[in-house]
């Protein structure tokens, strides 16, 4: 999905965080439009972005972000949101056979 972390900016992920706060219905609708398999791939990509990846990619830091927790590690935040969406659409225990 991402050939290099430079294709994605920390600002992109921070904007996602802001949208979750200000337009949660729009974000939910957009997430529902993505197949679970694609969400899993996106989650993997986001988890593989190490803390501080934007600085190492020589990206400009956010200036006075309103949502400081999300700004501190936007990839971790976005990965958690994607993971919650995956869990909301998959069985609780897909590896277990339902009782007869």
Image: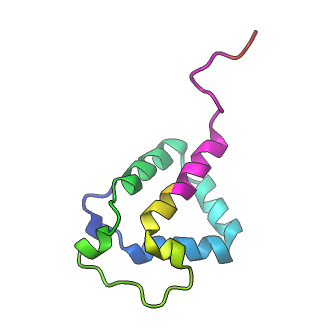
Q: Give the range drawn in magenta.
A: 80-97
> Where 69 sits versus 86, above or below?
below
Membership of 31 in magenta stretch: no
Q: Up-down: is 35 above or below 73?
A: above
Pick the residue in front: 56 or 15.
56
Q: Residue at x 48, y 90 (%)?
A: 64
What is the residue that sits farthest to the bottom in this orientation?
64
The answer to which image quadrant residue 63 occupies is bottom left
Residue 83 picture location, percent across and down: 54, 49
Image vertical order of residue 44 relative to residue 63, above or below:
above
Q: Does the magenta stretch include residue 83?
A: yes
Q: In this view, does 21 lie to the left or right of 81?
A: right
Residue at 59% over, 57% down: 31
Residue 100 shown left or right of residue 85 in the figure: right
Residue at 63%, 53% (x, y): give it: 32
Which quarter of the figure is the N terminus placed in?
A: bottom left
The number of numbered badges drawn on the structure is 0
Q: How is the image coloured?
A: rainbow
Across and down, in percent, residue 16 comes to: 53, 71
Q: Where is residue 46 shown, x and y percent of the image?
A: 40, 57
In the picture as drawn, the residue positioned furthest to the top comes out as: 100
Q: Quarter-wise, where is residue 27 in the image? A: bottom right
| Quarter of the image with the C terminus in it | top right
Does 86 appear above or below 65?
above
Residue at x 61% of width, y 43% of height:
87
Q: Residue furthest right?
A: 100
């Amino acid at each position: 999905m991402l050939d290099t972390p430079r294709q994605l900016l920390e600002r992109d992920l921070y904007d996602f965080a802001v949208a979750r706060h200000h337009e949660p219905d729009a974000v939910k609708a957009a997430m529902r439009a993505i197949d679970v398999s694609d969400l899993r791939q996106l989650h993997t990509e986001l988890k593989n972005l190490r803390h501080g990846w934007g600085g190492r990619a020589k990206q400009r830091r956010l200036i006075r972000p309103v949502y400081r927790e999300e700004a501190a590690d936007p990839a971790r935040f976005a990965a958690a949101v994607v993971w919650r969406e995956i869990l909301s659409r998959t069985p609780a225990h897909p590896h277990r056979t339902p009782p007869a």
